[in-house]
Image: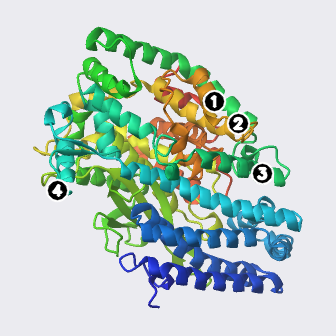
């Protein structure tokens, strides 16, 4: 047990894991998993206890260890770690293909599904069987031997390409730095951002200020820097990352073509028309046509609002700021100026009130009020000094689950924000419960000059969003690994709990309780909140069509598109159809679109809008019930949606909670686009 990746006795030993541990651990666990698979092929009689449980035991240990490795590769990336991660990724992918194509296992699952025992299974076990059989079909189990070999090779190659895509974006982000000596060039930037840039330069023994493409630096430059040339310089550097404008070894252009071609071939091997059809086989949506109709309908509703937003921005830029042309690097800066002029407040002013600890306390209070659960600090080995650890308990003190929070941006850490599971809930054979354990990762700015970190309101929304994902994983009451937490949940429904949580960032009592000015400790004034509320749907039309642009692009390159074709031309055509802000020709957004080329959202980015319909309608139930029924409505939401995991189709979950099919009206109303 000297190898920490082989120790499953408690919490992961992140402080002890080194790259040298990875290959021996993965090889050992793969050997054990393959032995379990071999035994499962011939077990007789086939029962849940004799067949599924031993398989779950072996594969869970493998994927738990690999999950720790994958997590470290995302948050503390080093050359040594990356090298060993890439080497073992192929082994893991190969094993997954072997299992999904194993006819012996497939036959055993079918035998179990047809057995008298299965007739008495609860909903969770029935769903596990259904998903498992579907997984074999989608994994190529019914192909001939040549087809299986090709399918497995494609899967392995895609895993490597996805990883390389993500690593190229990370490297391109970390490689850029702009050193500014004259503080006057940074006019308009918030003091704490300048202080952080100064500290970054000093840590390298340099004078002046170090500007990077990390979001805590990049976004303030785009939003507040009065120096138009500076905004343009960073914008150009950001939107050309991992493209032909940089080093060849970091150019994602050829990877995109390879990924799309391999995905199309994978779908064709299964007799499917496109990769989008393959992707939707595990989602709520029935067909690519249904998704594109949904997106086009929403675009038609939203574009007139977006055009109004754009016209107002152009007029303000021309009449008040002297800008005859509105460039891409002007949008955030002019938008912030317009917001200040129209609503008499700035996002920077608001940011001073959202101190990190107070925001977390407010978040945990929402969880307590909704679900009767307490979140408290806990202790665990971590991968970085920034990381905090928490436990979630019932009113009786029973442990529900635990989570890590890694809040700040840094080099070697992938950008964005996400939740991932470290250990899923499971009821063991002896009746004991394995509690869930999750990661919450964000990329906020740190506190400077001894002050606590402050969050923009957008940061607060992001935190609540990721906590929503975390709660979906932590609060599951399902005991079967395959459908506990987010496992087995249709991908276009996984954003429902996360987007639902965002709504509480707009309730005055919540906001008041989670604010304390970084200098004075005062709560956010109601007058300032009212201005925020008035501005809530500021440019919501532009934001909506931007998301629809990404979603339509994703669907169109995965359905009815020749992978040898021009991806940029597809994006340009989508923009001509739905966008109101057309980026410059050098913009290479696709080269950084990790959601679909390195994450789980391929032919699935529409999920954000699809699930937003569900989440807005679900939150409307809380609005209708009122504050006095908050706890009761929260318990019903927990019982019918959050705790169910993938044990029941998401559409049934929603109907059980809402008593009807979802309605788009709440989404349009929440976004200020109701008729």
Where residue 103 sits: x, y (%)?
84, 73
Cβ atoms at labels 2 and 1 below 8 Å apart: yes
Where residue 536 sits: x, y (%)?
37, 28
Q: Nearer the viewer, mark 4 or mark 3?
A: 4
The disc, 4 or 3, on the residue closer to the chain's N-terminal end is: 4
The quarter of the rendered structure image containing the C terminus is top right
Q: Quadrant of residue 122?
A: bottom right
Q: Quadrant of residue 612?
A: top right
Q: Nearer the viewer, residue 317 or 78?
A: 78
Which dot marks residue 205?
A: 4
Can residue 480 be seen here? no
For label 3, the SS is helix
Can residue 408 be seen here? yes
Q: Nearer the viewer, mark 1 or mark 4?
A: 4
Q: Is residue 556 shown above or below 455?
A: above
Q: Residues within 10 Å of mark 1 (few under 14, many from 20)?
A: few
Among all residues in the image, which is located at the extreme right?
144
Cβ atoms at labels 1 and 4 below 8 Å apart: no
Q: Nearer the viewer, residue 513 or 182?
A: 182
């Amino acid at each position: 047990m000297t190898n920490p990746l082989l120790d499953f006795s408690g919490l992961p030993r992140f402080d002890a894991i080194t790259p040298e541990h990875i290959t021996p651990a993965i090889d050992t666990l793969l050997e054990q998993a393959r032995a379990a698979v071999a035994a499962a092929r011939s077990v007789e009689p086939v029962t849940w206890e004799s067949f599924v449980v031993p398989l779950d035991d072996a594969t869970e240990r493998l994927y738990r260890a690999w999950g720790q490795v994958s997590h470290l590769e995302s948050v503390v990336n080093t050359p040594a770690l990356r090298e060993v991660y890439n080497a073992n990724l192929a082994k893991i992918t190969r094993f997954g293909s072997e299992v999904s194509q194993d006819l012996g296992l497939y036959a055993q699952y079918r035998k179990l599904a047809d057995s008298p025992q299965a007739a008495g299974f609860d909903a969770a076990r029935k769903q596990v069987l259904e998903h498992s059989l579907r997984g074999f079909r989608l994994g190529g189990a019914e192909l001939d031997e040549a087809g299986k070999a090709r399918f497995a090779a494609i899967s392995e190659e895609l895993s490597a390409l996805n990883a390389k895509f993500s690593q190229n974006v990370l490297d391109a982000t970390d490689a850029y730095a702009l050193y500014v000596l004259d503080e006057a060039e940074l006019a308009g930037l918030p003091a704490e951002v300048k202080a952080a840039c100064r500290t970054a330069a000093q840590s390298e023994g340099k004078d002046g200020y170090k500007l990077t493409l990390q979001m805590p630096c990049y976004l303030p430059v785009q939003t507040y820097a009065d120096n138009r040339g500076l905004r343009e310089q960073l914008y150009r550097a950001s939107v050309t990352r991992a493209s032909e404008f940089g080093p060849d070894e970091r150019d994602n252009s050829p990877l995109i073509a390879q990924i799309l071609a391999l995905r199309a071939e994978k779908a064709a091997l299964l007799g499917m028309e496109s990769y989008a059809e393959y992707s939707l086989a595990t989602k709520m949506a029935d067909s690519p046509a249904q998704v594109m109709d949904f997106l086009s309908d929403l675009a038609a509703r939203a574009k007139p609002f977006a055009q109004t937003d754009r016209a107002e921005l152009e007029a303000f830029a021309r009449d008040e700021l002297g800008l005859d042309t509105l460039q891409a690097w002007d949008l955030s800066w002019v938008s912030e100026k317009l917001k200040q002029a129209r609503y008499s407040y700035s996002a920077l002013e608001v940011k001073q009130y959202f101190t990190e600890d107070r925001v977390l306390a407010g978040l945990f209070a929402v969880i307590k009020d909704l679900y009767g659960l307490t979140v408290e600090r806990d202790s665990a080995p971590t991968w970085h000094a920034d990381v905090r650890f928490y436990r979630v308990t019932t009113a009786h003190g029973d442990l529900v689950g635990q989570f890590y929070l890694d809040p700040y941006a840094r080099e070697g850490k992938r950008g964005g924000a996400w939740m991932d599971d470290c250990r899923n809930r499971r009821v063991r054979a002896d009746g004991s419960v394995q509690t869930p354990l999750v990661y919450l990762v964000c990329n906020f700015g740190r506190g400077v000059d001894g002050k606590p970190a402050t969050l923009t309101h957008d940061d607060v929304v992001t935190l609540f969003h990721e906590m929503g994902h975390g709660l979906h994983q932590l609060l599951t009451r399902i005991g079967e690994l395959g459908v506990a937490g987010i496992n087995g949940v249709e991908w276009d429904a996984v954003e429902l709990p996360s987007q639902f949580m965002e709504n509480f960032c707009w309730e005055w009592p919540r906001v008041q309780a989670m604010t304390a000015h970084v200098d004075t400790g005062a709560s956010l004034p109601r007058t300032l909140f009212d201005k925020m509320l008035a501005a809530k749907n500021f440019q919501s039309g532009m934001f909506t069509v931007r998301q629809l642009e990404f979603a339509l692009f994703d669907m169109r390159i995965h359905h009815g598109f020749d992978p040898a074709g021009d991806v940029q031309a597809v994006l340009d055509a989508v923009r001509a159809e739905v966008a109101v802000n057309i980026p410059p020709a050098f913009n290479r957004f696709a080269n950084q679109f990790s959601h679909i080329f390195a994450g789980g959202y391929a032919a699935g980015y529409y999920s954000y809008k699809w699930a937003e319909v569900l989440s807005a309608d679900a939150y409307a139930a809380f609005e209708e019930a009122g504050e006095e029924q908050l706890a009761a409505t929260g318990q019903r939401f927990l019982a019918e949606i959050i705790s169910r995991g993938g044990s029941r189709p998401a559409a049934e979950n929603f109907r059980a909670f809402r008593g009807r099919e979802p309605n788009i009206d709440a989404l349009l109303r929440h976004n200020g686009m109701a008729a």
